[in-house]
Image (cartoon, rainbow, N blue to C red):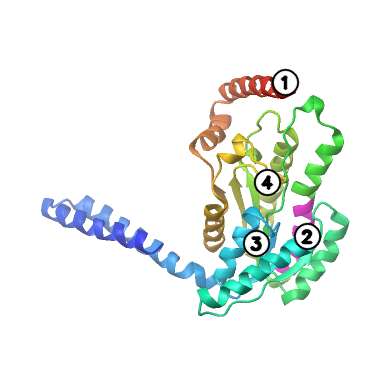
Amino acid sequence: NIKSVFLPLAGLGVIMDRLAGAGGGMFHLLCASMGFLLLYRLFLCLRKGTELRDAVVVITGASSGLGKECVKVFHAAGARLVLCGRDASRLQQVVQELTNKSPQTSSKLMYTPKTVVFDLADTSAVGRAAEEILACYGQVDVLINNAGISYRGNIVDTQLSVQREVMETNYFGPVALTQALLPSMIQRRSGHIVVISSVQGKIAIPCRSAYAASKHATQAYFDCLRAEIDQYGIPVTVIITGDGTKHGVLDKTTAAGWDPKDVAQSVFRAVSLKSKDVVLAGSVPTLAIYLRTLVPTLFFKIMSARARKEQRSMQKKE
């Protein structure tokens, strides 16, 4: 918030006064640079909300969890929302909550969200859904690919059908929707594509092969997409978070992640700043990402030990 910007500025003034007495020219230059950066940060804080006002924002998986929290944040910013999900009644419930809340919480114009019902795992239905989405406002300014499922189980016991199901929802679904909406963005030379991914798009954790594979594929696809559509001025943002599960049942890895409300605020900031890659994870997952790249041998040993521990845990439950 703005207060978090002004406080450092006040402290900077005190430091500069002391350094002025000391007569350090290089310190003056350093402090001036810091002041400029803080003022720029203030400018971005003031500007970021206005850029998304009236913007058409499409959010998949909008009826619960992180998707629902993103809906609240972007609605509060005055965006024109299109909520996507499989359950029409749950989507309408979210719309009703926002409609009931808006008059008391804000004096600025709020748009009643529109809804489009479809199953992202059914890629044959995505084309029709994209047409419905475009029919809502005639354009898409921001697409947030949030919907996804998780799966935990060792490879030996995981059926190929499960691998396919996870890949259909987490990879082919977002890819199909993105490619269906992309031509309209390219034509307008305007838009923004966001995907909610996971640290497991960067590293692979034992007993989550289906999920990790789908997130690795997602990371690679959207990294390629970012490079290819940069010429049209369309940014691509990958939000790297902790895990999520299909029915909201959290395992220890998931429970250690960020609160969805905090993640939603970070998604909003990333969209406002047109960030490319944003890691929203604890210190251990973040360290693991660097460890995998810099010291792969050590990383593999740690993962082997974790695999044995996971397998013992599963055997006890059986």
Alpha carbons under labels 1 and 4: distance apart: 23 Å
Q: Earlier in the sequence, mark 1 or mark 4?
A: 4
Alpha carbons under labels 4 and 3: distance apart: 39 Å
Alpha carbons under labels 3 and 2: distance apart: 37 Å
**Disc 1 target residue:** 315
The residue under the point 49% across, 67% down is 48
Q: Residues within 10 Å of mark 3 (few under 14, many from 20)?
A: few
Q: Secondary structure at mark 2?
A: loop
The residue under the point 57% across, 32% down is 293
x then y, percent, for residue 188 = 69, 72
x then y, percent, for residue 42 = 39, 64
**Disc 4 target residue:** 248
Q: Quadrant of residue 261?
A: bottom right
x then y, percent, for residue 160 = 85, 34
Q: Earlier in the sequence, mark 1 or mark 2?
A: 2
Inspect the magenta stretch and tell me whether residue 176 lies in it.
Answer: yes
**Residue at far left of view:** 21
In the image, what residue type sits under mark 3?
A: Gln
In the image, what residue type sits under mark 2?
A: Asp
Front residue of 258/134: it is 258
In the image, what residue type sits under mark 4?
A: Gly
In the image, what residue type sits under mark 1?
A: Gln
In this picture, which residue range is highlighted in magenta?
173-186
Alpha carbons under labels 1 and 2: distance apart: 36 Å
Alpha carbons under labels 1 and 3: distance apart: 52 Å
**Mark sitting on residue 231:** 3
**Disc 2 target residue:** 87
Q: Where 318 falls versus 61 (above or below)?
A: above
